[in-house]
Amino acid sequence: MADIAFEKDLTVAETGIEGLKVLDLAVHGDSRGWFKENWQRAKMTALGIPDLNIVQNNISYNDNRGVTRGIHAEPWDKFISIARGSVFGAWVDLREGSQTFGKVFTCTLDPSKAIYVPRGVGNSFQALEDGTAYTYLVNAHWSLKLKKTYTFVNLADPELAIEWPIPLDEATVSEADLNHPMLKDVVPMAPKRT
Amino acid sequence: MADIAFEKDLTVAETGIEGLKVLDLAVHGDSRGWFKENWQRAKMTALGIPDLNIVQNNISYNDNRGVTRGIHAEPWDKFISIARGSVFGAWVDLREGSQTFGKVFTCTLDPSKAIYVPRGVGNSFQALEDGTAYTYLVNAHWSLKLKKTYTFVNLADPELAIEWPIPLDEATVSEADLNHPMLKDVVPMAPKRT
Ligand SMILES: Cc1cn([C@H]2C[C@H](O)[C@@H](COP(=O)(O)OP(=O)(O)O[C@H]3OC[C@@H](O)[C@H](O)[C@H]3O)O2)c(=O)[nH]c1=O
Ligand SMILES: Cc1cn([C@H]2C[C@H](O)[C@@H](COP(=O)(O)OP(=O)(O)O[C@H]3OC[C@@H](O)[C@H](O)[C@H]3O)O2)c(=O)[nH]c1=O
């Protein structure tokens, strides 16, 4: 496994997409392995991460380097991080009326990184290592019915021009994810009704 | 890695220690790996797991088979599960006034299992695989200061007689964990002041 940077300070950085924020986490290494506070409400909200009323914690496990999932914009907020391995992540603004609609942000996430993804920003990743465990916290309950309210965009859309480290024709992608529309055909995600 | 049982129903089982509950989780396998709802508030509280006001999500990563951590009773509740690998877990009732004070429960946790550990029940585990990622959710913020209010008991206490799969003299254990008191010298954890 790639080396993890230990003992960084907890910090938050902007990404050019409103509300999408990347974090450096403090990971404490010792002879046993490492320990991290993956979500720490008081410290993170103090740094400008919105408070997350967590109702689900999901884990996707990716057997092989190259497994690629996305691009999914869901009607809730997500806090994403890595328990083992690393991913190349790509995020796309799919919010109706957003000044940066269609804008892409990419970065690598390993266990010393996390990202806060607001509702309506499309989320995707490609595992860079065999046995990559990807974990996230969300503030609404998933259901098969709600899946119809997601907004999807295609991983291979040339307009997005995401430079996947493993070419998509060598990657493992679900049937569903192969068939998402191109950006020009996407119906943007409408703001939350209040 | 050991095989994981896919598509179990979400169920909760009692352990003989009041409030300590073991869960079977539904893990969905496919060609990419697997996906699970690790914590799902609505479904789990409906099955009798207390609602958890999650403020921290912690991950400990264990490089090698045999890494052993514990036995720690902390002044908050925990929901524990595995993102990769597997552990042998041991829990000890350390609550003042409990009818089962000193009672031990053990079981193996892999990604298809979870356990709810109430405040005052001592928690410990031994990694059964290299690269075991152990993740948990808690309802209070950790601090170095609060660590003085933990209750600890020794992993090797013959009175507890825990049968660690890897003998402790071949295990990796922190200096702190080697020096915890035996059960007979433990000051039980007092109930929460309300
Ligand atoms: C998101 C989700 C899925 N599932 C089930 C449905 C399937 O049996 C299985 C995998 O679901 P997919 O729709 O194939 O999801 P996937 O392509 O893996 O994408 C998921 O991981 C990447 C995340 O970006 C995305 O939010 C999430 O949908 O898990 C659940 O039981 N609960 C859930 O919350
Ligand atoms: C529990 C905790 C620890 N830490 C830091 C302190 C150390 O630098 C490092 C490891 O802490 P230890 O006290 O050595 O914890 P450990 O022996 O790994 O036990 C932890 O994992 C097993 C869990 O049962 C237990 O709750 C937890 O204390 O992480 C944090 O920054 N935040 C925390 O919440």
Image (tube, coloured by chain):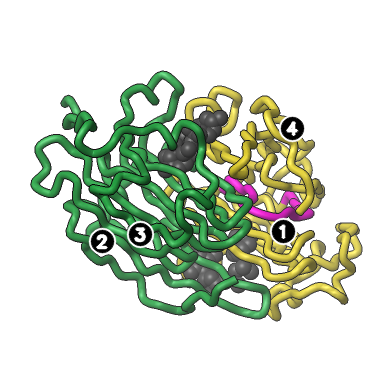
Chain colours: A green, B yellow
Q: Disc 3 marks which residue?
A: A163
Gap in angstroms between the C-alphas marked 2 and 4: 39 Å
Which corner quadrant of the image does residue A10 belong to? bottom left
SS for dot 4: strand
The answer to whether the beta carbon of the residue marked 4 is less than 8 Å from any atom of ligand 2 is no
Q: Closer to the observer: label 2 or label 4?
A: 2
Name the residue that disc number 4 marks: B14
Q: Chain of mark 4?
A: B
Q: Amino acid at mark 3?
A: Glu
* Same chain shared by disc 3 and disc 1: no
- Kindly report the distance in space between the C-alpha atoms of the residues bearing marks 1 and 2: 32 Å
- Circle 1 packing at 10 Å, graded few (<14), some (14-19), many (20+), is some
In-image side of B191 versus B16 (left or right): left
Inspect the image, locate mark 1, and give the three-letter code of the amino acid beneath it: Ser
Asked whether the residues under the numbered discs 2 and 4 touch, taking CB atoms below 8 Å apart as contact, a structural biologist would say no
- For the magenta stretch, what is the residue range? B78-93
